[in-house]
Image (cartoon, rainbow, N blue to C red):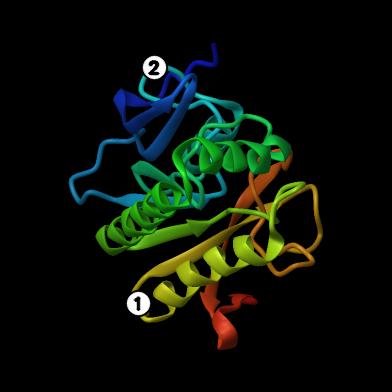
Amino acid sequence: MKKYPTFIIGTPFCKEKYLYGDTYLRFLLEVKYKESNNHNQVLCIMMNPSIANSNESDDTINKILKLLNEKMLFATLKVVNIYQVYKSQSDMLATTLEEIIYKLGKDEFNNIMKKKLSTIYEQIVKVDNIILAWGNPSEGMNEKKYLSRCSQITEFLSYLISKRLFVFKTGTWERILTQKGQPRHPSRNNLIDLVDCNIGIGNKICVKLK
């Protein structure tokens, strides 16, 4: 079991939902790691949860917490995802989504997706700082649908000009964004810093050059 870093404060908050078998959804994870009187929070939007909940963490969450703590950035990390289903191996996510559709039906699956978007929008409105970190579509995933969902989020952000947006700078890649123009996902990447960005024409992510 992966433990949270010793510097976190209290017990992380995790909003989950049981679906069937060993399949769970995570709508929100919130981890406080620094005392702050001004509710200094940052929201990170990623692809899907791996393991982290109230009781245990995972490599990706710990990697983000370590960077933010070392850089003395913000005080609380909140995490939401494009897809809420727990899956450690992202290349198995597409298969799991197909299984959910098969077991619950398309209507129920679409309802889950709508609730997912409303959760993301709700959390975006509550914070001033947002890290975009969902990465490229994983193997076997419908790329068009995935990028469309990402675009829905960037379109929503384009109307909220007061928000400060970031992407991760990694030591793994020279390019800040992926070749598909998506923000880097922390998994399998060495995180160095946060880089400011904004939403440009066509809801594209644009890195701000210093």
Amino acid beneath label 2:
Asn
Q: Is residue 100 above or below residue 197?
A: above
Circle 1 packing at 10 Å, graded few (<14), some (14-19), many (20+), is some
Amino acid beneath label 1:
Leu
Q: Can residue 70 be seen from the camera position used here?
A: no
Q: Gap in Å between the C-alphas at discs 1 and 2?
A: 34 Å
Callouts 1 and 2 close, C-beta under 8 Å: no
Q: Residue placed at 66% from the left, 54% from the top?
A: 135
Q: Can residue 116 be seen from the camera position used here?
A: yes
Q: Residue placed at 52% from the left, 34% from the top?
A: 61
Question: Within the image, what quadrant is residue 151 found in?
Answer: bottom right
Task: Give x and y (percent) for residue 158.
Answer: 43, 79
Q: Is residue 174 above or below residue 172?
A: below
Where, quadrant-wise, is the C terminus in this rendering?
Answer: bottom right
Task: Give x and y (percent) for residue 191.
Answer: 66, 44
From the viewer's side, name the closer residue of 13 and 15.
15
Where, quadrant-wise, is the N terminus in this rendering?
Answer: top right
Task: Give x and y (percent) for residue 121.
Answer: 33, 62
Circle 2 packing at 10 Å, graded few (<14), some (14-19), many (20+), is some
Q: Residue placed at 52% from the left, 26% from the top?
A: 51
Query: Which label belongs to residue 29?
Result: none
Q: Secondary structure at mark 1?
A: loop
Q: Secondary structure at mark 2?
A: loop
Q: Is residue 152 above or below residue 67?
A: below
Q: Residue furthest left?
A: 37
Which residue is tagged 2? 55
Q: Residue furthest bottom?
A: 201
Counting residues from the N terminus, which is met first, the one under dot 1 or under dot 2?
Answer: 2
Which residue is tagged 1? 160
Task: Give x and y (percent) for residue 112.
Answer: 39, 48
From the viewer's side, name the closer residue of 142 and 192.
142
